[in-house]
Amino acid sequence: VIYFTNFADQRLYAQFAFPGAEPIPLTPPDRGLRFADFAVDSARERLVCVVEEHKEGAKEPQNYLASVKFAGETDGVFPEVQKLAEGADFYSSPRLSSDGTRVAWLQWEHPNMPWDSTLLNVASVGEDGALGEVTQVAGGPAESVTSPLFDALGELYFVSDRSGWYNVYRAGSDGKDATCLLSMEAEFSGPMWGLGHQSFNLLPDGTLLCGISIPGELGGSLNVLDPLTGALTPVLPSYSNFGGMSVCDKGVAIVRGGFDAPMELVTMPLDQLTAEKPAADVVKLSTSFQVKSLYLSKPRPIKFDTPSGYAWMYFYPPKNAKANPPPGTLPPLLVKSHGGPTAGASTQLNLGIQYWTSRGYAVADVDYTGSTGYGRAYRDGLKGTWGVRDVEDCCEAARYLADQGLVDPEMLAIEGGSAGGYTTLACLAFQDRFKAGASFYGIGDLETLAKDTHKFESRYLDSLVGRYPEDKAIYKERSPINFVEQFTCPIIFFQGEEDKVVPLNQAQDMHTAVKNKGVLTSLVVYPGEAHGFRKDVNIRQSLDGRLFFFNTVFGLKAKMPDDLDEIILDNFDPLLKGEPRSFIFVDGYELEIGRESEIVHQVGYSDPGNSAYFPEERPDRPSGGAETVDKPEELSDFVEWL
């Protein structure tokens, strides 16, 4: 049986796993309840899960642990949802012992995020399903705990960053005095952004299947960890990126990939896990699109110095088997600032990055201060400094690569979306490192974000920026929307018309300010799109549109694909930089002519009425002037003559 929540109606369903079976609802409609993160309690014929209850007029929804019976509807009546634990702001990860007599879970309070502070609790479960006395096993004000899991003998394992790194621990017999299985300056878990997070799993022989990320290494590794000796045995060493994993008595299911291999779901027999050449059956490919290695740029981890310490990035040099750069030239650089901001750059094959490197751009995917994968101290480095340290790190990444002679210092661009878009906008408003930028649904106003967001992130900015409204001045001074006059380089905005996180008017205000300064800019608005683009044509146009825009800024070949709408540019100047220009007015058309490039550019038009058709001097232009010519039949003839 498969248990799931249906997004459309938020009801909990049971689905028998054979063809033709219809989903069976386990909860009534229209109760304002949402369900996630399930644990099957077979002995009591129920699910234990996290519930979020939405009540009209409430300041925010209530979260609690609860149980839902398998029985479903009987004579039009559904069993009541039974509350098991409540009182904390957030709950996650309910996990039952194999005999069903104990349950472990995580909880935390505002203003913490789960990577700041969580508590790991354990309670006995009575025959009636109610919980007994609660014992705190791990966690505290400066400790983040994730992924609790009981083994077959009832011992509790979990991941904690109490050492400064997310390592795996086993709780003591008294529920406390935990033992670290293997102490490493490495991460056995990432940040818990969603429910259902499980960073390791237990194999039938008592060993652990776990992913490990080590700073400075490409991607991560999958390993079998012996809890008695701490020995690690690699699994699938030819792959460097791993997603979820599931274990049963016969084998495992793993999501795997690499910088040159798309993600895929595979199943493996248990005896193949540590084989030299493991056999795996591919169940599902994330994409059937294949890219030859001659066109794939391999990322290189780079640690570089900054004024405040150091930062990390993955550098992708340009690569295309059919193209070589002109001798003596350096490639343009695109800096990418990831979202989150408590997240990290991934080295998993990303065609959105390879798109740029195959077209002659180098890419720097920056893991600025505050990114995950580098230990707690690095992650906490962004506390109170969002909009400062991340901006500094992105600018320094570009400077470092230019100083190393890897990129052209006059062709530096930056892009980002959502929280990454905020870093991009802050770089362009408060620094002068970059020559061009692109923001897709980027956050321009931190106050708007602080005042109107969902419960999970409603106090996120308390640690990143400051308490609101007590620290309102800091929010104002770090919001690019308040400093539009400081945007001095070309920038393009992509925005969903129905975005509630970043309202359209923010992008409109910034675009208008840049446009009024005479700087090259563009605003592309997508009807029906919200915070993130979902229609394939819009995803394509926003990607091709950024290339078109950056190439235009850098004087490179720029053309939109024929099957996509054009990108309308404001303040576009097609002439060569610094070349002498002539301006003439003919039959209502104001034309600008490059004397070296011989490019004719229409810069304006006004209805000439019944006036004569001849070139007119423009004394208001510094290079104004005209020549006497016979009137041609068509304007195009005149342009050709010029």
Image (cartoon, helix red, strand yellow):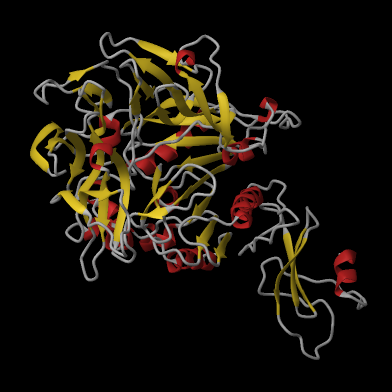
Q: Residue at x 88, y 64 (%)?
A: 640
On the picture, is 56 further left or further right than 520? left
Judge from the rendering whether residue 155 lies leftward or rightward of residue 551; answer left or right.
Answer: left
Classify residue 82 as left or right of residue 519: left
Task: Name the outermost residue toward the bottom.
Answer: 610
Quick one: 106 or 339, which is closer to the camera? 106
Q: Position of residue 298 (x, y in %)?
A: 57, 26
The quarter in which the C terminus is drawn is bottom right
Looking at the image, residue 620 lies above or below residue 326? below
Quadrant showing the N terminus: top left
Q: Quadrant of residue 445?
A: bottom left
Relative depth, front residue between 264 and 76: 76
Residue at 20 percent across and 65 percent down: it is 59
Return the residue found at the far front. Answer: 75
Q: Vertically, is 197 above or below 279?
A: below
Q: Position of residue 478 (x, y in %)?
A: 32, 54
Does the image show residue 454? Answer: yes
Give the residue at the far left of this rendering.
Answer: 133
User: Is residue 114 in sight in this rendering?
Assistant: no
Give the total number of marks visible in the rendering. 0
Q: Residue at x 26, y 34 (%)?
A: 146
Q: In this view of the protein, which residue sits in the foreground, 377 or 613?
A: 377
Name the foreground residue: 407 vs 546: 546
Q: Residue at x 42, y 62 (%)?
A: 484
Q: Position of residue 469 (x, y in %)?
A: 19, 61
Image location of residue 607, percent across then percent down = 73, 85
